[in-house]
Image: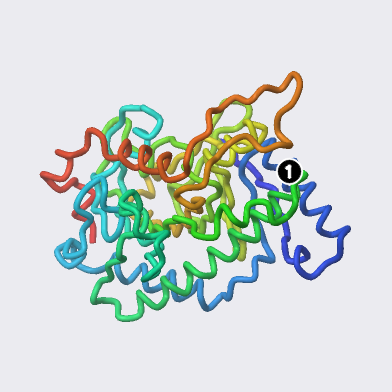
Amino acid sequence: MAMIELPIVDIAAWETGGAAARRAIAATVAETCARAGFLMVTGHGIDPHVIAAMESTTRDFFDRPLAEKLAIDTAGADVVRGYRRIGTTTVAYSLGQVAPPDLREQFITGPEPIAGDPYFDAPETALYFQPNVWPVHPAGMRRAWQAYYRAADGLARRIMQIFAAALALPETWFDDKIDRAISNLIASNYPAQPEPPLPGQLRAGAHTDFGSLTLLLTQDRPGGLQVMGGDGGWHDVAPRPGTFIVNLGDLMAQWTNDRWRSTLHRVVNPPREVAGDSRRQSIVFFHQPNYDAVIECLPTCHGPGDPIRHRPVRSGEHLRAKLRKTQKGVAGAVAEPSNQEKVP
C-alpha cells in the first residue's frame, strides 16, 4: 500500500506573523483542502503536557477491566457520552455501507449546557449537551480530558479562521456559527488482534467525518489510517511527532459546494505477522458547528456556471442522522463479546 505524504502547514505565524504570512498560510490551506481534504499542522500551540496527560490517562482507562468500563457504558443511539465497547458501532453505515462492527472501543465526551442559558434548554438540544460521565479510575482523567477539550476547541476555532481567509471570507465569518459548538472528543483503543477479524471487518470502516473539521492525534503503530486518494486507491498515512492530522468533514464540503473535499478514510487491520503487538490509540476532536447553525453554500463558492449542489441543513440534524446510522444493524452485536474483546 502506497504511503501518502500529507502537506505540513506551520500555523504559528497566523498569530505571530504579518499579513503576508497569513496570506501564505491561507493559500496553502486552500490548495490542500481542494486537492486532498487532509493536512498536518504544526505550530498549533497546544501544551505538550496537556497532550501527554490526555494520552496517558486515556491509556490507563482502556487498561481497566471491562466490567469497570461498562459501569459508564453508553445506553443507545441517543446517548453519546461514556464508554462504548467493541462491536457496538459500524461507522461504514453512516454512508449506507453494510459491514461487520468496528474493532475498537471508545470513550466519548462533549460540551455541557450552561445553567440558566435558554439556548441549552430547547427539547431538541438533549442529544448535544448531555452530561459527561467519568470513571472513578484513573483519578486524573476528568481533569486531563477537560484541559485537552479546551485546547482542541481553541485550535479548531483558529483553523476555522484560516479556512475563512482561504475561502476569501472575513476571518471571523464562522465565529458566530461555532461559538456554542457541539463538538465531541473521542478516544479509540484498537486492541491487538491475536485472532483474525471477520471477513470485511476493520478497525474502523470507510467513512467521511460528519462535521466541519477533525483534529487527530494518533500513534504510528501497525494497522492505521488510510485515505482514499484522487487515484481511487487507498494510501497509508503516517503520523508525525508534534503534528495534528486535520481533515475536513461533510459540513465543510457542503459549505464550500464541494470545492473542498470530505475525504473517504478508514482504519485498517494490522498485518497478521505483527497483529499480536498492534495496539493503537487515537484521540479525535470532531469539531461540529452550533446545533442550530445552518450549513448552506458560502457566497464565495457558487456563481454563474457553478450552481449550488446541496440543500441547507442544520448542523445538529445532520449529526443526529449520522450517529443513528452508525449503530444500525449492530444491536445484536453486543450479545456475545468478540474475540478481540478478550484481549487485555
Q: In this view, does 329 lie above or below 159?
A: above
Per the image, the residue denoted by label 1 is 167
Decide if residue 95 is on the left or right side of residue 39: left
Q: What residue is rendered at 18% in x and 46% in y?
A: 338
- Considering depth in this image, is 319 or 237 the residue closer to the camera? 319
Q: In this view, does 130 lie above or below 260?
A: below
Q: Label 1 amino acid? A: Leu
Name the secondary structure under disc 1: loop
Task: Confirm whether residue 191 shows in the render.
Answer: no
Quadrant position of the N terminus in the picture: top right
| Colour pattern of the rendering | rainbow
Name the image quarter holding residue 57: bottom left
In the rendered image, residue 193, in percent from the top left (x then y), is placed at 30, 49
Q: Mark 1, residues whose alpha carbon is within 10 Å: few (<14), some, or many (≥20)?
A: many
Q: What residue is rendered at 67% in x and 32% in y?
A: 259
Task: Confirm whether residue 34 shows in the render.
Answer: yes
Decide if residue 182 is on the left or right side of residue 312: left
- Considering depth in this image, is 42 or 151 the residue closer to the camera? 151
Decide if residue 341 is on the left or right side of residue 33: left
In the rendered image, residue 229, in percent from the top left (x then y), is placed at 60, 32
In the rendered image, residue 6, in percent from the top left (x then y), is placed at 65, 46
Q: What residue is rendered at 39% in x and 57% in y?
A: 186
Work out which residue is located at the far top of the displayed protein and give it.
305
- Considering depth in this image, is 256 or 344 the residue closer to the camera? 256
In the rendered image, residue 156, in percent from the top left (x then y), is placed at 58, 59
- Considering depth in this image, is 286 or 218 the residue closer to the camera? 286
Q: What residue is rendered at 79% in x and 47% in y?
A: 27
